[in-house]
Image (cartoon, rainbow, N blue to C red):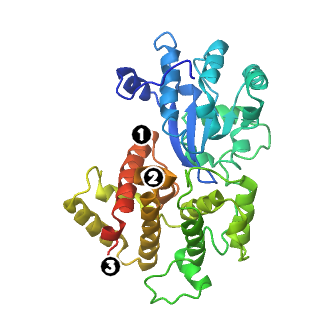
Amino acid sequence: MSILQPLSPHEPEYKAISTFNIIQEAGVDHESRPILVLSACKLPDPNVIDYDLILRFILARLNEFVESDYVLVFLAAPAAYRPPWLWLLKAYRALDRRYKKNLKALHVVHLTRTYRMIFDLANKITSPKFARKLHYYSYLSELEPVISISQLNLPSAVRPYDEQLQRPNTPPAYASREGKALPGLAFGVSLEKLAEFDNASDADEDYVPSVVKQIIEHLQQNGISQKGIFRKSPSSEELKFVKDELNRGVKIDLSKYDIHLSASLLKVFFRDLPQAPLSLDFVNSVGNITDVTEETLQHLRTQFQHYYGTQTKLKSLLRYLFSFLHDVSNHSDQNLMTAHNIAVIFAPNLLRSDDERAMPDPATYLQQMNKGMGLVRCLIQESELVFEQ
């Protein structure tokens, strides 16, 4: 059990600490896993706020993600106030198995040698297995091939600090990601191009890319009752191999791989679409959805028609996806994936601005995701009514 209990969002300390933006969401990584960013430069004066309260706040935020696979980025410098190493050990011990199990990677940037020795010692003594998830980076440029720096919404103090550390001739930290797969025949390709690859007619208003059909049909037959479907990550190497093979047009027998690989492929497909599957303009036009009433559905249908009425391929694809996700939610007694749980996972993969450079600040991003999750949940629950032809 944790030494400290997470703060409740209803406690006044929670709201006060949240204003510091110490820990923030930052979209999803290359494998469609949520990213959390912990910034040391946002830590307040320990003489003003008890750091145990800050730790309880961090645990509360992690609670929102621990049921699914997630990734944590720790920006260790610059920092006006550094927690004592005994507090770091307390924080490490507070991360019990529930927090560590689904944490797939902890990326630590700008950590000093002394603190790194403390981290390594704690891992060797208490959790050698967890140590394999821990990755150190001296510069942001070293992190870039793993996670896009542009999506992390770095605090203003981090970039200048990194530039001061950069060795001569080190590539800029914010250059294009090395090794990013070029668009192929399945992922990162427009729906129009995919239709050409599939020899689909322009008049086909029910067109769905063949790769999406293959994945969803496989999930429908073999994974719809799988406990925690969409929450777990497959082998990174297998995911990359199968994705690359599909991008080359190679026929893949998905039954030879873990079912969670197909679930991840579906999320990655929508995340990699050049056009945002659900634009932020559409999300904002719909507004917050709390109760699903006939008036809400009519407003949603009207806005959907306004934004996607002429985009027949995207409209058909969304109809196909949400019909399937509705079926998944209908099996929640077996797979434990309610419409809300599915929305939490799919919203970051579906919602974004069409302008990739328009990364909002953390507070705005959180508001957009909250709106988006309500919208995605409604689309799952009422897919037949929203997408009626």
Q: Earlier in the sequence, mark 3 or mark 2?
A: 2
Q: Measure the C-alpha gap from mark 3 to mark 2.
A: 30 Å
Residue pointed to by mark 2: 333
Q: In the rendered image of this protein, does residue 315 appear above or below residue 171?
A: below
Front label number (1 vs 2): 2
Residue pointed to by mark 1: 363
Helix, strand or loop at disc 2? helix
Q: Residue at x 58, y 85 (%)?
A: 196
**How many numbered marks does the figure carry?**
3
Tell me, yes or no, whether the two marked residues, 3 and 2, touch with CB atoms within 8 Å.
Answer: no
Q: Measure the C-alpha gap from mark 1 to mark 2.
A: 34 Å
Front label number (3 vs 1): 3
Q: Earlier in the sequence, mark 1 or mark 2?
A: 2
Depth check: 107 or 137 in front?
107
Kindly identify the amino acid type of the residue bearing the numbered disc 2.
Asp
Q: In the rendered image of this protein, does residue 106 appear above or below residue 296?
A: above
Tell me: 137 left or right of 190. Answer: right
Q: Earlier in the sequence, mark 3 or mark 1?
A: 1
Depth check: 234 or 27 in front?
234
Helix, strand or loop at disc 1? helix
Q: In the rendered image of this protein, does residue 244 appear above or below residue 372?
A: below
Quadrant holding the N terminus: top right
Kindly identify the amino acid type of the residue bearing the numbered disc 1.
Ala
Helix, strand or loop at disc 3? loop
